[in-house]
Amino acid sequence: EVQLVESGGGLVQPGRSLRLSCAASGFTFDDYAMHWVRQAPGKGLEWVSGINWNSGYIGYADSVKGRFTISRDNAKNSLYLQMNSLRTDDTALYYCVKATGYGSGSDLDYWGQGTLVTVFS
Amino acid sequence: DIQMTQSPSSLSASVGDRVTITCRASQGIRNDLGWYQQKPGKAPKRLIYAASSLQSGVPSRFSGSGSGTEFTLTISSLQPEDFATYYCLQHNTYPFTFGPGTKVDIK
């Protein structure tokens, strides 16, 4: 059974940093691209970032480009999101999501339960 | 970036109704589109992939169609458990983009 467990969320002030982690199990992690998707309270889904199987192709939403960095450690079956220069509009539930294939164009199938990031001034 | 629009943004329907939701892409995305259902407090669930393929385990009353820039999700006979918000996602090009969502509630 595919399991994605996010951690690292919390309360943080604007301008500070936070690192999210996602522990993956139940599938061969390095066979698949992975993504982060967020959802602000009461709002829709926003794709944040994606990384292919070997970290060779990475993409970001314009809203986070230059501030957030996605990475993965295939030896540890883990996905990460380093979030710097946080803003109040980064407040959201952050989901770790598995892709259906190894490449950047694969769509998203399994979702974690999310970790909440709250940026307050 | 590819922009995704959805219509309607919300709808009220009765059990047994046929419901159609449309998603449009600002440029052609072949069939690189998925549909997701989200219920309050839950993670999204994939219903349709590759625009028209039904995810395993999803009831056959759900169907998808379209290619290029216009796509449709149809629920042939709405059931009580289908009241939720539905999102399309284009995964043709980074950055991926979701539609703004369609909330389906009880009439």
Image: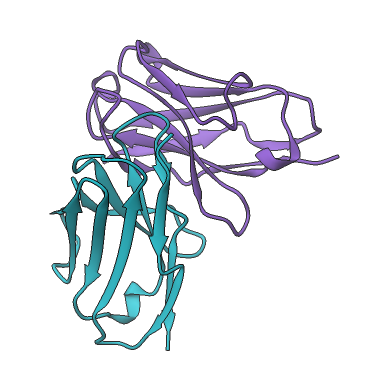
Q: Which chain is represented by cyan in the image?
A: B
Q: Going 43% across and 17% down the picture, which residue do you hit? A: A72
The quadrant the C terminus of chain A occupies is top right
Confirm whether residue B53 shows in the render.
Answer: yes
The colour applied to the residues of chain A in this rendering is: purple
Question: What sort of colour scheme is used for the picture?
Answer: by chain
Compared to residue B78, the image places residue A65 above or below, namely above
Location of residue A1 by image quarter: top left
The percent position of residue A117, horizontal first and vertical second, equals 66, 40
Residue depicted at 57% across the width and 23% down the height: A65
Please tell me which residue lies in front, B21 or B62. Answer: B21
Q: Report the side of A13 relative to B69 (left or right).
A: right
Decide if residue B52 is on the left or right side of residue A27: left
Q: Quadrant of residue A69?
A: top right
Residue B90 figure quarter:
top left
Query: Residue A5 location, x and y as percent?
Result: 46, 37
Residue A76 vertical placement versus B27 (above, below): above
Residue drawn at x 20%, y 61% as measured from the top left: B58
Regarding residue B55, the answer to whether it shows in the image is no
In the picture shown, does residue A79 fall above or below B2?
above
> How many labels sit on residues?
0
Q: Position of residue B49 (x, y in %)?
A: 21, 48
